[in-house]
Image (cartoon, grey):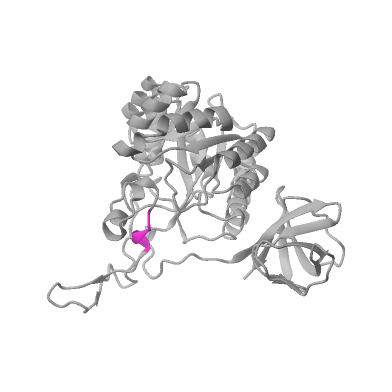
Amino acid sequence: MSENRIKGKDIELLIPAGSLEVLKIAVIYGADAVYIGGEAFGLRAKAKNFTIDDMAEGVAFAHEHNVKVYVTANILAHNYDLDGAEEYFKELDEKVHPDALIISDPGLFTIAREVVPHIDIHISTQANNTNYRTFNFWHGLGATRVVTARELSLNEIRQIRENIPEDMEIETFIHGAMCISYSGRCLLSSFMAGRDANKGACTHPCRWQYHLVEESRPGEYMPVFENERGTFIFNSKDLCMIEHIPELLASGINSFKVEGRMKTALYVATVARTYRLAIDDCLKDEEYYRSRIPFYKEEIAKCTYRKYTTGFFFGRPGEDAQIYDSNTYIKEYTYLGTVGVDADGMYVEQRNKFSLGEHIEVMTPDGDNIPAVVISITDEDGKAMESAPHPKQKVYIELAGTDGRKPDIGSWSILRRQE
């Protein structure tokens, strides 16, 4: 875990994981804590999510590396959702041993406090936490941390810090997708697709393209123009604060949170490593950090993203915070696989096809990017292959650096290809 501290507490880099594989990548690439969802009570029903056994293995792996794990149970619960909550929390306690639960619903909060009072509870951003009285309310009920609403400015967060107890922690999203609805409380998905965003099944209608239809002229689609640039009227840019680490550190935030429990291992590794480097560099030497901003921006763009904004941190977003001409991600690099090493050599469990002679980049956990060429691919039986076309196939590879020499590449390095 990072030794960085503010107001007597560690500065925590909190990274999402939607699977056991991604959790381990987050841990290796610089997370101080990871948040995950189980198969119930979380807000990412479309993520792979974790079985109880996977959660237990993931928490054990994280704890071996001095990294914490938080489990989400942040749906807005209906009566029928309460059935089974008590047993679920007990099972998490007995088999998983999470460091905290992330909860938004007062009913689920009450159940958790009754049955697992020794597990910390963090109040989700879904609870609309916009003022210091709300923070103090939750602190009085026993919560140890509150996640700020995404609609807050840094100035408002500083005011919250000044008006809450020192032992109450502040967690804030600093990177990732933004929701068009207030604190993520959306009814569009339920209304238009019958899938409840507040129970983890959002279909992201804010990313759809809309036209206007007059009721007496069915089938006649008239374009909707917010301005001359396009028609994606609800489509926010992604949040990115990589250029503003000093301002975040000065705000009194304890945990810097990244959105993305449905993201790939490449996304998680890229974002975790870049923010880890930026935070550590800034706390060591702010001028050095500022000199490295072009590098951080270049690195953060090597995963999928929808252009970037600073959200509400510096005031109410204007029209430049929206994307009007497209709802698609920008993708500049493709994830090929994660390196492992065994008695037979270096191997990769393939994630996207790659071939002999391809120029790729090896991303290492310590911050290096190594250009390389694929000079050999063999299957588990030692048979030579021209390419690795089959998803999740385990293949042994040899790489050569651009200088012709064999690079020193260890386990957990990630192979990626520029598109």
Instruction: From the top left corner, tell me how far across and down residue 127 is, in percent.
Output: 34, 37
For the point 51% across and 40% down, the residue is: 256
The answer to whether residue 97 of the structure is visible from this angle is: no
Residue at image coords 58%, 51%: 268
- Asked if one can make out residue 194 in the rendered structure from this viewpoint, the answer is yes
From this view, report whether residue 411 is shown above or below residue 116. Answer: below
Would residue 111 be found to the left or right of residue 51 on screen? Answer: left
User: Residue 133 location in percent, x, y?
Assistant: 32, 27
Q: Residue at x 68, y 44 (%)?
A: 28
Eyeballing the image, is 204 above or below 378? above
- Reply yes or no: does residue 210 show up in magenta: no
Q: Is residue 346 left or right of residue 85?
A: right
* Quarter occupied by the N terminus: top right
Q: Is residue 210 left or right of residue 88?
A: left
- Tell me which corner region of the image, top left, top right, bottom left or bottom right, holds residue 303: bottom right
Region rendered in magenta: 202-207
Q: Is residue 92 above or below residue 235?
A: above
The image shows residue 299 at horizontal and vertical percentages of: 61, 57
Q: Position of residue 161 (x, y in %)?
A: 42, 29
Residue placed most toward the observer, 416 or 351? 351
